[in-house]
Amino acid sequence: METVRSREVYANRWITLREDVVRQVDGEESIYAYIRKADFAIVIPWDGERFQLVEQYRYPLERRCWEFPGGAVAGESDPVAVARQELREETGLRAGRFTVLGKVAPAPATSTHYGYVVLATELTEGAHEREPSEMDMESAWFSRDEVESMIQEGAIVDAQSVAAYSLLLLHERRGGAVS
């Protein structure tokens, strides 16, 4: 595919919407719209028996959603640094150990960003440092069985969280320590 021309349709501090005219392999031109977004980290906080999830209102879905903590940090690209900050901000937890489990592309047909899945262990509790837009956020501990039931029953619908949990299971299956 060859880009013939490109334009920015919309931008704010979180996303940029681009529209490109592309030439397909057969020579036909078509329009391809996509979003540019910063990469992010998804953090799996595990205390050896439980996972900590956060719940927040997701405006496009018009509902509250449980998910693993995560997000992007302006100007920061190191997944562990992002995971450390997001974990502290959203849950108040601090981790003594971070393990990068993998990388996901949540919307490869429409977005440029990747998510890095990071396991956080050796946890200590502290006060959260949520941003003003996160003040309605709640956090709670859940057993492995509860998390799996929440995924199956649709209480956890966030695709990044489901993918993160899958990467954790693969990590464990391949003998990775979850200490």
Image (cartoon, rainbow, N blue to C red):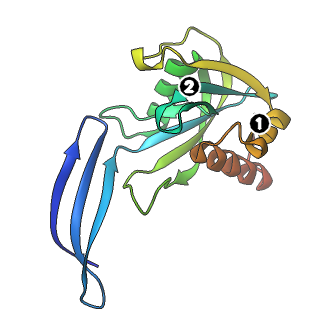
Q: Amino acid at mark 2?
A: Gln
Q: Residue at x 76, y 56 (%)?
A: 174
Write down the residue under mark 1: 147
Residue displayed at 45% across by 61% down: 108
**Residue occupying the point 53% across, 16% down:** 136
Spot the residue most to the right. Answer: 145
Up the image or down, 166 lies above or below 76; here it is: below
- Nearer the observer, 52 or 174: 52
| Disc nearest the viewer among 1 and 2 | 2
**In the image, is 34 to the left or to the right of 129?**
left
Q: Secondary structure at mark 1?
A: helix
Quadrant including the C terminus: top right
Q: Residue 13 location, x and y as percent?
A: 26, 34
Residue 10 x, y percent position in the rendering: 21, 46
Q: What type is the residue that disc 1 sits on?
A: Val
Q: Which mark is residue 56?
A: 2
Identify whether 19 is placed above or below 62. below
The percent coordinates of residue 23 (x first, y second) are 23, 81
